[in-house]
Amino acid sequence: MRVRTLLFASHRDLARADSVEVELDRGATVSDLVAALRAQGGVWADLPVTTAVAVNHRYAPADLPIGEDDEVALIPPVAGG
C-alpha cells in the first residue's frame, strides 16, 4: 500500500517536499514507516528511530498499524524556552 506522509518544518526542509509517498505492506506499523524512510538513505538516513509520528491527528505509538487512507505526519523535534 502507498502511504502519503506529511512533512513539516525541519523534515520538510530536508526533503524539499511537503509530503512523501512510502510503499508499505498491508498491516505495517508506524515503526515500519520510519524504518522504510530510513532505509531510503540520503536525507532520511539520520531520521531518529524514535521519530514522533501522528496518525489521524493523534500522536501514534510505534506499534500502531497504518491504513492506506490514514493521514500520517512526521512531527519534527521542537525546542523552546
Image (cartoon, rainbow, N blue to C red):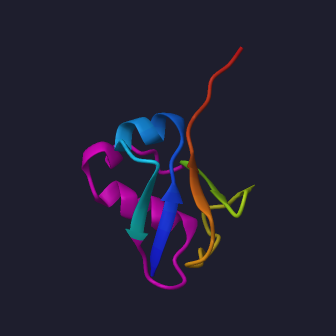
Instruction: Tell me the quarter of the picture where residue 58 sits.
Output: bottom right
Side (left or right) of 39 relative to 65: left
Residue furthest top in the image:
81
Side (left or right) of 28 relative to 61: left
Percent coordinates x, y for residue 25 in the rendering: 44, 82
Q: Residue at x 73, y 57 (%)?
A: 57
Q: Residue at x 34, y 48 (%)?
A: 44
Tell me the quarter of the image containing the C terminus: top right
Q: Residue at x 55, y 78 (%)?
A: 68
- As drawn, 80 above or below 26: above
Residue furthest left in the image:
42
Percent coordinates x, y for residue 45 in the rendering: 31, 47
| Viewer-closest of 59 and 2 | 2
Is residue 42 covered in magenta?
Answer: yes
Percent coordinates x, y for residue 77 in the rendering: 57, 34
Percent coordinates x, y for residue 72 in the rendering: 59, 62
Instruction: Tell me the quarter of the picture where residue 43 sits.
Output: top left
Side (left or right) of 50 relative to 1: right
Magenta region, residue range: 23-50
Residue furthest bottom in the image:
26
Tell me the quarter of the image containing the N terminus: bottom left
